[in-house]
Image (spheres, rainbow, N blue to C red):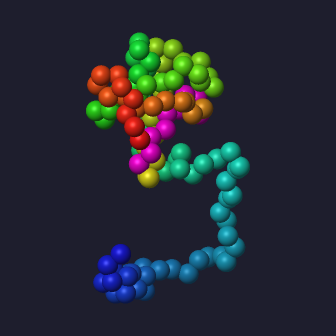
Amino acid sequence: MPIVLKEYYWEKNNRKFSKKPLSDEDFHIALMPDQDLRNYVCYTAECKVYRDYTIKFSKRIYQIEKKQPIAIKPGDNVILKTWLDGSIHIFKKNIELNFFEIDDYGRRVSA
């Protein structure tokens, strides 16, 4: 972060706009053990599973693996999430699917 922002702007901005809390008590709710905040703060897109069990998104092709924790068939809609760290995750009914990226020729793309 540039020094100008850190030392000048934020201090001036906080002095101008900060307000005292109505209460000193913390009302934040803890996440459940099975909740992952990265699944909520991410980019989300709904995608369709093609007949060859692939998903196309943003000029990339993802091959769904045969072994899955939930049944997948062509025509199903799945949710593709791009976490803020850039990693891709594919879900059906909140269950993450196993997949890998392939190129236009069907070859696995190394990560």
User: Is 46 on the left-hand or right-hand side of 25?
Assistant: left
Say which of 76 and 104 sits in front.
104
Visible residue check, residue 74: yes
Q: Position of residue 49 (x, y in %)?
A: 43, 20
Q: Quadrant of residue 1?
A: bottom left
Which residue: 67% across, 77% down? 24
Which residue: 53% across, 50% down? 38
Q: Position of residue 99 (x, y in %)?
A: 49, 30
Quarter in which the C terminus is drawn: top left
User: Is 49 on the left-hand or right-hand side of 103?
Assistant: right
Which residue: 67% across, 53% down? 31
Looking at the image, is 81 positioned above or below residue 24?
A: above
Q: Which residues are magenta?
A: 86-94
Residue 9, magenta (yes or no): no
Which residue: 46% across, 14% down? 74
Visible residue check, residue 12: no
Q: Position of residue 45 (x, y in %)?
A: 41, 35
